[in-house]
Image (spheres, rainbow, N blue to C red):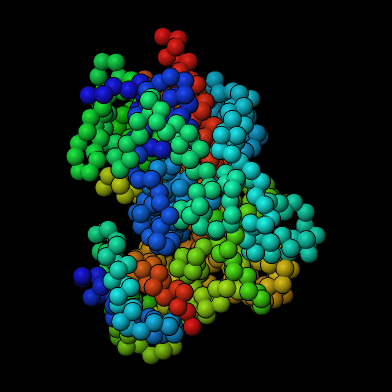
Amino acid sequence: MTAYDFAVVGSGVGGAAAAARLVRRGARVLLIEEGEKAQPPRDPVDALARYYVAGGATASVGRSLVPVPIGRALGGTTAINSGTCLRPPRALTRGWRTLAPGFDDDRFAEYVEQAWTELGARRASLETASTSSRLFLRGLDALGIPGGHLLDRAAESCSGAGRCCFVCPTGAKRTADAAFLEPLAGASGLEVRTGCRFLDARDVHGGFALTLERSGRRERARAGALVLSAGALRSPWHARRLAPDRAREAGRRLSVHPAAKVFAEFDAPVYGSNGVPQGAGLVDPEDPAIRYEGAFTPPELTALTMPLDGRALAGWIGRYDRLAAFGYMIRDEARGSVAYPVGPSLPVLSYEPTARDLERLRRAMLFVARVFFAAGARRVLLPVNLPANVFDSPEALERGAPSRLDARRLQTMGFHPLGTCGLGRVVDADLRLREGVYVCDGSVVPESLGVNPQVTIAAFGLRLADRLLGARDAR
Amino acid sequence: MISLALALPFARAYARHGGYRLDEAELSRVLERRLAALPPWARAHAAAAALFARWLAPAALLGRARRFERLEDPDREALLAALQRAPAPLRALYLGIKAPLMTVCAGRAP
């Protein structure tokens, strides 16, 4: 049985960053990934089936229905994310010193910059920005609202194919595997097993005996230490089994950044699915917990995210070429949980936005609608399941838009599950769960960030690798 | 395939109601392909959703003791609107058939 210094479960941005740095500094690493290397699919629906956990059907079903799509591929959710790069707010990370004694946020900021560089974050170009994004920026200008900007993305040579969330067809998006693993292709210290599921780890002298499953057959390996990077919805399962004394806490404090988008119809063709869907953004001028970011999906999925059905839906989809959309997400106050009544493959999420979350979502929805009208939209569709969710003028919007949001009426999604093995609560400042076991993915981010988290999670990965090697060298 | 047998009558009526530009042979062929690509649990979800949408929803949401495809036009539109505004668990159930159906219909809208 091959022995490794470290086994990393999951190749999302946290696991990939940690594994790569460990290998570069001389360690032998086994990286275990349940998914396969993502290849450009036949169509977006094929991408959902092959590279999204449960075909994209992971969701919290309570008063609200909140889908939480996560990736299942080499690179984890970075294979199907928008590639947006944002640094964590220093005002938040400074507070993590209190949550986890020993956490140094100044030092963490250095790792954030390293992650930024290794992901190749670059400012998106206006040439590749979608028409949706340009219309939103135009609307901001018309209203005299400053601050609209192009976003930084891990996609240096992006040509604007607009399929970021369905596997980049050109390879321009720097997924976790492209940024961290591909440069190590052929490196003797790294073994990557895709299509391989981590089942269990048993304490043995000198580390762990791992049980894996690939193509229906059991495999075994040994590792000196274990890094769980299976994602915020899966790592708690493993954490509970490996550290039963932390079982009560692992899986709680889930945040998701609830998000939605407003559709707008214009007289002239928009072709909203061309160009970078998430190329532009804005922080709400009055509430920094609200962030506006571009969003657009192919028609099959646009039809599912519209709060319409029947002929009403067909009417909007029939004018798909004239539709623009822009999204928003909030730094949520709500905290949910993940449970596993039937095992780790079908996590059960429980998540309900708070009243303040709902008010922020309402304000954000109306803001985008107003901006689109200012850009010349003839009508807008709000993401609420109400009889009156279409408005054909700013005046009609002001008269008829809901004055408060009911969670049961939300048409929303959550793209960034975080917090379920939070720093200072489940893992310590060094991301240690227990002796020899560490966690490094979105689950360790201790609170809702309010920004796209891949840079933050990558920073945790780089930092963890340095910690692990420092501890090993010290022994 | 059981899920296709249960889904097809609903799919036909849905596509006809929405005015989507596809004939029945194409609808059947593409829907079968979409359903076949789903894992077993998702096919079961689609089957359950089709049963719900065709048989149970008209009674539960509209008070009409008729299958979906036999509803009058306004009732069909009202039912679909009601499904969209239904409580989250029913919406989640209904998505089991709406999702594969929209992959067939979207792009062929009137």
Locate residue A76: give its quadrant: top left
Q: Residue at x 32, y 88 (%)?
A: B70
Picture coordinates of residue A261 (x, y %)?
57, 62
Q: Residue furthest left?
A: A217
Residue A358 coordinates in the image, percent (x, y) = 57, 56
- Please give left or right for residue A429 compared with residue B9 in the image: right
Residue B34 shows in this picture: yes
Q: Position of residue A416 (x, y in %)?
A: 50, 47
Residue extending furthest toward the top? A475
**On-image quarter of the C terminus of chain A:** top left
- Taking the spot 29% from the left edge, 36% from the top edge, the residue there is A198
User: In this rendering, is residue A234 above or below A43?
Assistant: above
Location of residue A77 in the rendering, given as x and y in whole percent from the top left corner: 45, 46
The front one of B75 and A127 is A127
Q: Residue at x 40, y 49 (%)?
A: A38
Q: Is residue A105 visible?
A: no
